[in-house]
Image (tube, rainbow, N blue to C red):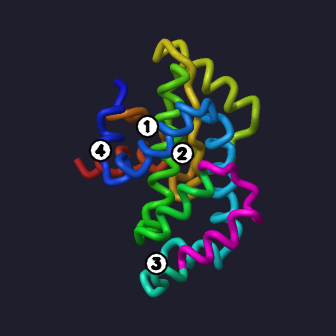
Amino acid sequence: MENSGGIEASLAGPHASAPFGLARDEKQIDAVTRSLDSVEAAMAESADLRTLVTSPLIGRADAGKAIRALTPTLGVDPITGKFLGVLANNGRLSELKAVIKAVKQFAARHRGETTAEVTSAYPLDDEQVAKLKANLKSRLGRDVLIDARVDSTILGGIIIRHGSQMIDASIRTKLNTLANAMKG
């Protein structure tokens, strides 16, 4: 069920393998993943940072200057700081979100873990996440990290994606199935 070959094949894979390899060699995987979590959180909170990362109107030089100025504020480790600078200088900041995801997948695989994307209509509490992790661990045979997302359009229930497998127990899907059955 592991889809690790897809990481390297994706556009983000080559950009993610370099910082991950350096973090692994320097025994800084945990520091880099924590830093990337901080960057991800900052992107979620700051419209200006999202614009910097996604706007094609911001040139490489300006993006590089902005990233170098932001790095101390973000509190990232040196490997992540250099990596962000390289992405900016190469005009690849638009791939940052996918690269962060790929680095996290590399790190999880390195630790013997796997990641499952979990979509729910409402945020899951700690107890629900713990139960879900335990259930997935028994099913997959290894520790599972949960990449939780909230999508109110599923109405209720849960959708779990792991590699190429998907379990869709959402209310939206059940209602659509019922509607199609009633059409005859």
Label 4 and label 3: CA atoms lie apart by 54 Å
Q: Callout 4: few (<14), some (14-19), or many (20+) C-alpha neighbours within 10 Å?
A: few
Label 2 amino acid?
Thr
In x, y percent, where is residue 99? Answer: 46, 52
In x, y percent, where is residue 11? Answer: 32, 54
Of helix, strand and loop, which one carries label 4?
helix
Label 1 and label 2: CA atoms lie apart by 9 Å
Label 1 amino acid?
Arg
Q: Earlier in the sequence, mark 1 or mark 2?
A: 2
Q: Earlier in the sequence, mark 4 or mark 2?
A: 2
Of helix, strand and loop, which one carries label 2?
strand
Residue 11, label in figure: none
Q: Callout 2: few (<14), some (14-19), or many (20+) C-alpha neighbours within 10 Å?
A: many
For the magenta stretch, what is the residue range? 63-79
Q: Nearer the viewer, residue 131 or 74?
A: 74
Magenta segment's dominant SS is helix
In x, y percent, where is residue 139? Answer: 48, 15
Residue 161, label in figure: 1
Q: Measured along the vertical axis of the image, is residue 78 above or below residue 117?
A: below
Q: Is residue 67 magenta?
A: yes
Q: Which residue is mark 2?
A: 119
Q: Which residue is mark 3?
A: 60
Left or right of 32 in this view: 116: left
Q: Which residue is mark 4?
A: 181
Residue at 54% of width from left, 77% of height from top?
63
Q: Is residue 157 magenta?
A: no
Label 4 and label 2: CA atoms lie apart by 25 Å
